[in-house]
Amino acid sequence: MTWWCSASDAAWSWQWRAYPGVWLFLVVLVLLRRAAWARASDQSGPRRPLLFALGLFCIWLAVDWPIGPLGAGYLLSAHTISFILLGMIAPALLLLGLPLAAWRPASESLTSALRFLAAPLPALVVFNGILMLTHLPDFIDGWMNTQLGSFGNDLAWLLGGAVLWWPVMAPRPRIGRLSAPAQMGYLFVASILPTIPAMLLVFASFPVYGLYELAPRVLPILNAGNDQQLAGLLMKVIGDIPLWTGFGIVFFRWQRHEIGSTPPAHQLAG
């Protein structure tokens, strides 16, 4: 039974296929979120549930048909789209969609771990370590052809993305987060580091991954080399958008707060 998308040497078909493991995974996330919401006392209207639902939609889009199977074994560009959705967009929406009270019952040891990951250096090391590891040729060529390996890859991206956004979204005061200027600096640095694998894909003179080089062609006009270059461009250009969007939101909120906290001119003069 095929419960999760994985690589296959069969010719690509646009006929829909069911992946029940994807649906089960989404149901588990919904149940966990409902449990957190039931314990929450800070009911803040429909905004948080809507953001969480958007995060679930991004996960479903990334791992279900057609992007999921295309990325698992046919197109590196589709694989990169899955990475952007799972590692950059969905975790931010899921964290924003959780009630703040969800973090209060955490044990002291878990709280200490969350505080540690709210620091910029550990968060960057964890996220970029996962990014580099899951884009190594040995990893992709060796793991994406099994359902368990493909699931592990997707789960690693999702958890790595949550760690990436944690220094910006960690609740105060229990966990703590970076100040607004530090958040902007952190997001700027976070947007630079993925440039390394992206440029390697764009400028490589040969296909890096045997899995995608030897995969049956989905589109005749998109060969393995073009697909790899497109993947690198997507990782850099589209992958930066969530980080720069977060940068812009932090900046404008910070500016609004600074302007709102500035005394009137006559008080400054006095």
Image: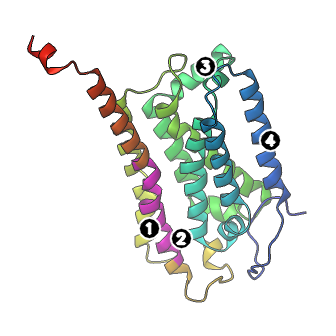
Q: Which comes sooner in the sequence, label 2 or label 3?
A: 3
- Of residues 270 and 29, the one nearer the viewer is 270
Q: Residue at x 51, y 68 (%)?
A: 231
Q: What element carries label 2?
A: loop
- Determine which residue is flagged by label 1: 233
Highlighted range, magenta: 227-244
* Neighbourhood count class around disc 4 (C-alpha, 10 Å): few under 14, some 14–19, many 20 upward: few
Provide residue 72's location: percent of width, then percent of height: 69, 66
- Determine which residue is flagged by label 2: 208
Q: Which residue is drawn at 82% across and 61% down?
A: 19
Q: Is residue 132 on the magenta stretch?
A: no
- Determine which residue is flagged by label 4: 28
How far apart are the two marked residues, 3 and 1, measured between alpha carbons?
38 Å
> CB under 8 Å between callouts 4 and 2?
no
* Neighbourhood count class around disc 2 (C-alpha, 10 Å): few under 14, some 14–19, many 20 upward: some
Q: Residue at x 71, y 69 (%)?
A: 66
Camera-nearest label, 4 or 2: 4
Provide residue 143's location: percent of width, then percent of height: 70, 59
Provide residue 137's location: percent of width, then percent of height: 58, 63
Q: Which comes sooner in the sequence, label 1 or label 2?
A: 2
Camera-nearest label, 4 or 3: 4
- Determine which residue is flagged by label 3: 111
